Image (cartoon, grey):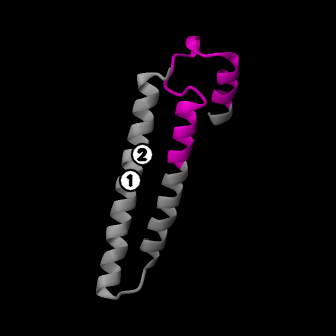
Amino acid sequence: MYSSYSVAAAVCSCVFSALAIIAVGFRLRAHLVQQSKLGPDDWLTLVALALAFSYCCLVLYGSFRASIGQDLSTITPDEYSNYQKVN
């Protein structure tokens, strides 16, 4: 059974990652409509989006495999080992 904090962390991570993808999509779409080149800030935005997506993956892994969001006294030694790998 997953802690409500684990589920909350996973949901927030996914929701904000989806919002970031939508925002970057709108930004790129605006450049496409205006037929303007992508500037350095746009490329950095894409890099930041990739980093945010990788962070989302880490939070999902940590929430459901490494017991992030759970009280340390309630997890098994294997889960604690996974927790130490993520942190």
Q: Which mark is residue 18?
A: 1
Residue at 33% x, 62% y is 23
Residue at 50% x, 53% y is 53
Above/below status of 5 relative to 43: above
**Mark 2, secondary structure of its residue:** helix
> Is residue 80 in the magenta section?
yes
**Mark 1, secondary structure of its residue:** helix
**Residue found at the very far bottom of the displayed protein:** 35
Q: Which mark is residue 14?
A: 2
> Marks 1 and 2, how far apart in space?
6 Å
Say few, some or many: other residues with alpha carbon within 10 Å of mark 2 (under 14 / 14 to 19 / 20 or more): some
Q: Position of residue 11 (x, y in %)?
A: 40, 38
Left or right, residue 17 beside residue 55 = left
- Give the quadrant of residue 22: bottom left
Q: Position of residue 55 (x, y in %)?
A: 53, 47
Q: Position of residue 45 (x, y in %)?
A: 44, 66
Say few, some or many: other residues with alpha carbon within 10 Å of mark 1 (under 14 / 14 to 19 / 20 or more): some
Q: Amino acid at mark 1?
A: Ala
Residue at 42% x, 45% y is 14
Q: Are marks 1 and 2 in contact (CB under 8 Å)?
A: yes
Q: Could you say which is closer to the camera, residue 23 or residue 2?
A: 2
Left or right, residue 40 beside residue 83 = left
Left or right, residue 35 beside residue 63 = left
> Is residue 52 in the magenta section?
no
Q: Quadrant of the C terminus?
A: top right
**Residue found at the very far front of the displayed protein:** 1
Determine the main secondary structure of the stretch shown in magenta: helix
Q: Which residues are magenta?
A: 55-84
- Give the quadrant of residue 9: top left
Residue at 43% x, 43% y is 13
Q: Amino acid at mark 2?
A: Cys
